[in-house]
Image (cartoon, rainbow, N blue to C red):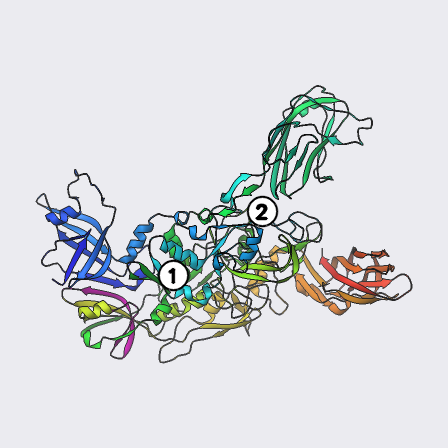
Amino acid sequence: MIFSIEVDNVVLDLFDDEQVTLTRQIKDLSDLKSVYTDYTQSFQIPATDVNNGVFQNFFDENVLLQSWNQYDGLDATIYVHGIPIFVGVVELTEVNFKNGLPRDYSITFYGRTKNAMLAWGEKTLQEVDWSAYDHAIDNTIVQSSWTGGLLSGDVVWDLKDYGFQYTYSEYTIGNNVRQTQNITFEELRPSIKVSAMLTTVFADIGITLSGSLLGRSEFDNMFITPMNDAGPMKDRFQLQSGLVEANNSTPQLCAAPIQWLLNWQPLPLGDTTISDPSGAWDPSNYKYTMQRTGSYTFRWTITSHDNINAVLQVKVIINGLISSLITTKSDMDQWLNDPQFINIPKGYLGDEIQIVYKTTEDVNIEGTFECIDSPWSLDPAVEMYKAMPPTKIVDFVNGILKTFNGILVPVSDTEIEIHNISDWYGQGNTKHFTDYIDMETINHKKVPIPKTIEFKHAEGTTMAHKKFKEVYDRPFGSVKFSPNVDFAEGELKVETPFTVFPMTLIEEVNKNGIYVRDTTLYWNQVYDEGGKPSKCELILFYFQPPVDTSYFYFYTDWLMQSPRSMFVDGDQSTSNSLAFGLEGTLEGDIPVNTLYMSFWNEHISRLYSTRSRIVSMNINLPVAEWLNLQLNDTIVISGNYYKIEKLTYNLNKEQGVIELMTYPNVELSRITGSSGRIPSWTDPIQADAGKTFIYGHEMKVNVSHASWDGTDYLTDSLDITQYPSSEVKVAELYRNYLPTISLNKICIFEQNPQTILFDVSPAGLNTGSVVQEGDQSRYDYDLATGKVIIQQNGQYKMKGTVVLDNSGSHLLDIGIKINGFDTEATSWNGGNHTMTYNVECTSTLAEGSEVTLTGQTQDGGSHNIDVLKVFLIVESII
């Protein structure tokens, strides 16, 4: 007999007339949840003693199964001519009885990839052996990882904002990255290369992953941030640094001073320390010193007193400065057993906290002081499995296959290849099968094509994702379009498990927290509208090593270079993008190598070709040819070229039915580049190879998120913090964006130091850049003279800021002038130091009015002054 099958090291008995038909089909390589392999076969085998022994007499429900049960697979090998050809597992599906006795078993054979599925089962990423990526961590190691210095570049601790709401300001405000000791490694998470994650999950079940997909340049700097929980990587922390519990052993005196409104004293709660492992509490002066940078919560309670008439006032001071408003209660009973809380979202190492009081009368009190929440101390040995989310491995691998149009191809018992399907097709050999085909019975039919095509990533819950969808009426990075055909059905819908972020960055604000401008610190903001950390189980991004930034920030030292975590690996037209459709960066051109264009366009365009057909025919194929056939081979029949969709082959008869799809080298509709926000396209032309129906207006509008203005397709693919230039007024963008804008303003500015001649006559201060919000038609400007020209009547608010070095102690005047006339916005100063002038005013202005930020001397002389920064902001308020 040509065929035999061995299960659990036992050669099964087969029926003499057993017809062995094996099916191989391309679709089973692309979804782990389908058939899982390109080799499947169902068998009916007799209920002989040999076979009963293998399946432990499963036909008898009274038999207690021992080492096997019906839900487990059994190792199996298929032999052809005594040679082991296929290795896999068998599944028992049923037993058939006749006259009350078992007659046969129904079993199904699955090839090698099924083994991987069985091995993973319900296993999650948290259960994989990630020990090869365990490492020590500190601030120095974090910075080293930015340049590939950690685990050969496979792990990076990139900069993301996990709910701390970082800002950038010249002023002392909360979570300001321009201040010292702001960002530490405790606020971050590790990210791991996509290629490293994939090879590790396969290695965990003893399979080597190879193939062309991971060798593509798109994967060079592609990372995933796994999130087991929202916020920083809490699971690696060992203990909280700074927890304190203290009380009063005896009543302590709160003395009323002679002038009680003038003197504040430490509130004497906690003179006896019960627990303080980190030494943060000083019971002698009732002062708490922070041991680490991070979030703190304190609780204090007065439990007894001896003078109800005392009026007690209490406030909290940090480093000698008032941190909270004064709390007053008119009698002591109001304080009794009423816990008071102090919440400090972010304190810094060395900060001193003290509660102080005033009282109208002497009163003895008892009570407690506690630090009930503080930053965690870090175990420097990071175990990577603790960073992983409870995502099933199967879902993760399927997500990769969906995202990159990938397939898994079994090579051996211990090796599987992963490819993009178009790349894999290109690696196949050419087989001439004309002589094997039965030309009498051939069937051609249309390739079934979907009515709609949709690609999208998992929708993020962060503020950036929700804002983007609110503005653009679509999830970030998504694509949905309907090819221009009349007869189609169903849909091709691909949704990945990965979260991809729109471009987000840190904003510069003033001392009141009001937006001034964008910085060049591109850090994903992983928090919701309320500032709470968001959990995104698998964040997919490109990591870019530190690049120069004019906005220095503090991470263990002052840094003028910052790494970037973005959905693109650059801001050139030729850069790669992790969005399916065109999405814009804040700088440069739109990267056109999207996931759709790079991994899906060619494959789908072939399906929609005018020459696409499904061709079915009978084939008489020798076993040797069948064994050497690969599913990516190109089959040549009578001069026509095909790819294999499905081959059903009877080993006994060496016959089968082959289902082929035409494989025309169609002309494709491609995005060839971009200039600013305008993509350029090539449309497919009619050729001998046929023309695809994936082209034209419908595709351009939806794949590039653009609208036709009569000359170009203008994309609305702008980041949510950017606004359209006067040349690019996209209808969809204006429809979606204008309702979210309450004010319209312009800022002309210069941040590069310059030397300006100040004279007795006022002159406009030179600026070099401009940013606008809202309706840009309201303003014109002249940067060289520091001038804004009003284009619409209305009421406006004007603010000017100038930073200069007045080392010569000259008397200088900075002011805002309207049409050359003085306003109340003026400031004189003659100090011998670097000085900041802030001037502002409001006025009703007519169209054509000129607003100028000027400088002049008031001491009668002319002086060259080093001007460090200049800003003029004009904002419409009515």
Amino acid tagged 1:
Leu
Q: Which residues are magenta?
A: 629-652
Q: Position of residue 161 (x, y in %)?
A: 57, 51
Amino acid tagged 2:
Gly
Residue at the spot x=67%, y=24% of the render? 334
The secondary element bearing badge 2 is classed as loop
Q: Tally the marks.
A: 2
Can you say whether 322 is above or below 752 in the image? above
Q: Position of residue 42 (x, y in %)?
A: 20, 56
Q: Position of residue 454 (x, y in %)?
A: 42, 61
Can you say whether 78 is above or below 256 in the image? below
Check if residue 408 falls in the magenta segment: no
Residue 19 as seen in the image, left or right of residue 755: left
Q: Are marks 2 and 1 in contact (CB under 8 Å)?
A: no
Residue bearing the label numbered 1: 492
Check if residue 644 falls in the magenta segment: yes
Residue bearing the label numbered 2: 531
Which mark, by number, is residue 451? none
- Which is nearer the eye, 324 or 711? 324
